[in-house]
Image (cartoon, grey):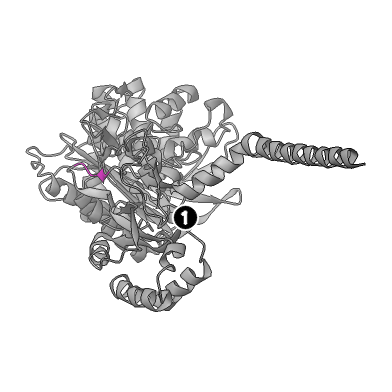
Amino acid sequence: MKPRSTRARVSFVVLTVAVLTAIFMVRLIDLQIVQAEALNAEADTKRTLTKVTYGTRGDIVDTRGAVLADSVERFDIVISPRVTLLRQDASVVVLEDLKKITDIIGGDPNEMLTMILENPESDFEYLAKSITLEQYQAVADLGISWLYYELNPERSYPNGEIAGNLVGFIGTDGPQAGVELTADECLAGTDVEASYARGEDGVALPGSAVETLAPQDGGTLALSIDRDLQFYVQQRMAQTAESLGATWATGVVMRVSDAHLLAVSDWPTVDPNDVNLADRGALGSRAFSTPYEPGSTVKALTAASLIDAGVANQRTQVVSPYALELTNGGGVISDSFYHEDQRLTLAGALVESSNTAIAQYTDLLDAATRHDYLAEFGLGQATGIGFNGESSGTLYDAADWDARTNYAVQFGQGLSTTSIQMASAYQALGNDGVRLPPVLVESCTWPDGTVTDTPSTEGTRVISETAAEQTLQMMEMVYSSSGSAPNLEIPGYRVAVKSGTAQVAENGAYGSSVVISYAGLAPADDPEYIVIATAGIPDSIYSGAIASTFRDIMAQTLTTYRVTPSSTSGPDLPLRW
């Protein structure tokens, strides 16, 4: 019996060892193979620390280099509550430190302590965000060992509302509007993440960083806008809108020689530093995004087209009644005020802004050709600037014009344009008939000095030099002979202008609301600058109400750029026959 018992005990021991070995083998396989990836990841999170190194977003500057947007240094204060609470009498000591910190950056030290106590096992919490460089230096001088700091650049707009509609702003999800959004490829910096091994106290171990790339700063975006002129135009358009009770207003200044936009004003506008104060409709630029029926400012383009096509000249005659029955069932159109029949030249039709006269001149040129002229002036198509939310306006094909629209488009109804498009069309008149692409962004200069995004200088001939010159002469007669002439005068300068008053379509029909505008160029004998001043839905329904605004902006522009006064007298064209 004894040998048999011994064998049983040996067998039991062997079996037990085998079972235990199998259990250990299964557990080993589970840890090293089945769960290896998950366990390694968990271990990495406990022994590594990831830190973002930011590439600085590039500046936005005006044409003279004045900063419109830049990035400023801000710091986040980071703590490890677990490590912070390791010390003896931690709550008392930490609260004392927190009081010193909040004396510098503000805040409630008791609330901060509560956050720490509620996360005792956490190795990463924000104690404060976006403190200034001065605050960071003061807190760092306290020598508190359980504080860590992260650089986190923020966007700053030092001029507030000045060009805020163009610059745009940054939100929590990145660029939201303006050139901040459309030129993000130029401005955006490239951030990189660096991984560090960390010790028990959560501090990164020296020399343990693993970083594959260096962060890259963004480029400097130069706009064609002149900050000082922009400020003036914004102030003047705000005054105008408020005095007229308008819903919105835009003011545009463009240089004739290269089509650079020197000022683009919107009212109301936005301060990118505090977007929440602005109405949602003011977060973009109405000058780019809000088309309107321009009214009689289009008559200058119509006159230029007729002269270029050789079917009319400055002295071509018509009899203009107050009301005119259109052909082919187009109904009746009328002028804005009652008058007896007028014997007008083409120059006189512009001065009197007669719809019935322009309608008769319209019959001298077929619809398709007239449409093509308007399209060449840039109507019905995007400007090429690519601004966020930009509208192309509306210019229907001539084949789709009904009998009334066939005439109405030539005096600015039945089509829609933006303020930028109208400035571009008038640029062609001032540039000897050649329209250049409008420019808002002059360039992007990268940190290594490379310059990109320079604008195209290739123009399109719309009308002949002669047609452009003769059209400007007729527009000078508007400046000197129209009812608004006293409110338009800029001593020493010849000016070419055209007013516009257009009814606003409401629920499929024209109502009592209007958009009023003045557009023009100066000096008329050698055009250098274009100004477009527009007010939407004002209390006054006459364009003359905005004439003085046009004058003031044009005078400020001529003064700003020290334009030489005109040395010759203006034309004296016959207005009647």
Q: Quadrant of the N terminus?
A: top right
- Identify the residue at image location x=43%, y=33%: 382
Prevailing secondary structure of the magenta residues: loop
Q: Is residue 462 left or right of residue 388?
A: left
* Residue 365 pos. (x, y %): 43, 24
- Identify the residue at image location x=59%, y=37%: 37
Instruction: Report if residue 438 is visible in the image.
Output: yes
* Residue picked out by circle 1: 281
Nearer the observer, 243 or 227: 227
Instruction: Report if residue 338 is visible in the image.
Output: no
What amino acid type should be assigned to the residue bearing mark 1? Answer: Gly
* Residue 90 pos. (x, y %): 41, 74
The magenta segment:
59-63
Nearer the observer, 381 or 414: 381
Q: Residue furthest front?
A: 2
Nearer the observer, 302 or 52: 52
Q: Is residue 61 magenta?
A: yes
Q: Residue 283, relative to residue 424: is it above or below?
A: below
* Residue 341 pos. (x, y %): 40, 44
